[in-house]
Image (cartoon, grey):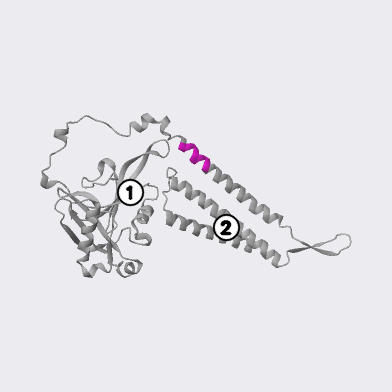
Amino acid sequence: MKNKKISSVLLRILVSAVLIFLVFYTTLPALNLRDRKFITFLIISILIILVVNFLTYVKNFLEGLGHGGMRASRDPVTGRFTFEKSSGTTDRAAIAKPIKYGLALILILAAFSFIVSLFGIKLFNASRYRDLITISDGDFTSDISELSMSQIPVVDRDTAFRLGNRKLGEMTELVSQFEIESNYTQINYKGSPYRVTPLTYADPIKWFFNMKKGLPAYITVDMVTQETNLVWLESGMKYSPGEYFFRNIYRYLRFSYPTKMFDTVSFEIDDNGVPYWVAPTITYRVGWWDGKDINGAVLVNAVTGESQYYPKDEVPQWIDQLYTSA
């Protein structure tokens, strides 16, 4: 009986752990109390534990009924045995306590979220929101260089998308296997404005047959001349949003930096044309999770997966998308 009870406890722990991991694997919250998604993850995890324990209780109760749910007792005077249905009081007590504690934890987390949200109300933090931006005097003529008409960018995101699709369509060996990511990040590359974007797998089947080599190229569009190039890589990109499992760039970042909160991840290339994923890291300067600001960035080499965190004042100069653009 004791071994059966231990096995039941271990099974509940295992099932709960697997389900909680699957939730974390799909939602990818930062393990940080200043991330709203983490509070939600904790509440879901508690609910999973409660449901698993409750279902185990129901299973044991039904099994008891299946075996008659009877217990025998002997009258000390007559010596006769009598049989009666087991009340299941012990089981009810065992399940009631975890439910009580679990619901209490959920209420505490909900109350915590509500209270810390009050700390960031704009009505009470006008000066702190104002100070998020540092204002300094400047001279427009000296600070902003004048461009000639031949240097003005004429390619927007939609135009870049059409130009990129046209270029990919010229590559018959690629068009059936890959598509183009639609982000088209705007960067400055070798002194000129460009939009760049990686290829992605056309579907899961194409991913399965091509994942070993990775994504073979990325697209560059000159925003002034409209020149569009497909840049081939000696070794394919193994890390991107189009990957599955732990090479998916979002999952790779989360498991590599579990406590950091990330803003929008963007695709860029350095001055040598090496592709990178730039993941700005978030901090909050008003209240608990208000007044979002960027305090650094994680750079991930899209080919090798090598990554490094840089504080904001040490981020390489070639990065253009530290702050999300419209």
Q: Residue at x 32, y 41 (%)?
A: 295
Q: Is 125 placed above or below 89 here?
A: above
Q: Residue at x 59, y 63 (%)?
A: 7
Which structural element holds mark 1?
loop
Examine the structure image and report whether residue 113 is included in the region drawn in magenta. yes
Please identify the dominant SS of the magenta region: helix
CA–CA distance in space, label 2 to label 1: 35 Å
Residue 69 at x, y = what percent? 73, 64
Left or right, 20 with respect to 313, comes to right
Vertical side of 7 occupied by 144: above or below: above
Residue 100 appears in the picture as rendered: yes
Describe the element under mark 2 as helix, strand or loop: helix
Q: Is residue 302 above or below residue 42?
A: below
Q: What's the residue type where badge 2 is placed? A: Val
Classify residue 108 by image quadrant.
top right
The residue that appears at 24% across and 67% down in the rendered structure is: 174
Quarter occupied by residue 3: bottom right
Q: Mark 2 vs mark 1: which is more N-terminal?
A: 2
Image quarter where the N terminus lies is bottom right
- On whether residue 216 falls in the magenta region, the answer is no
Say which residue label 1 marks: 264
Q: Nearer the viewer, residue 292 or 17?
A: 292
- Label 2 sits on residue: 52
Q: Please report the bounds of the magenta region as a residue range.
A: 110-117
Residue 79 x, y percent position in the rendering:
86, 63
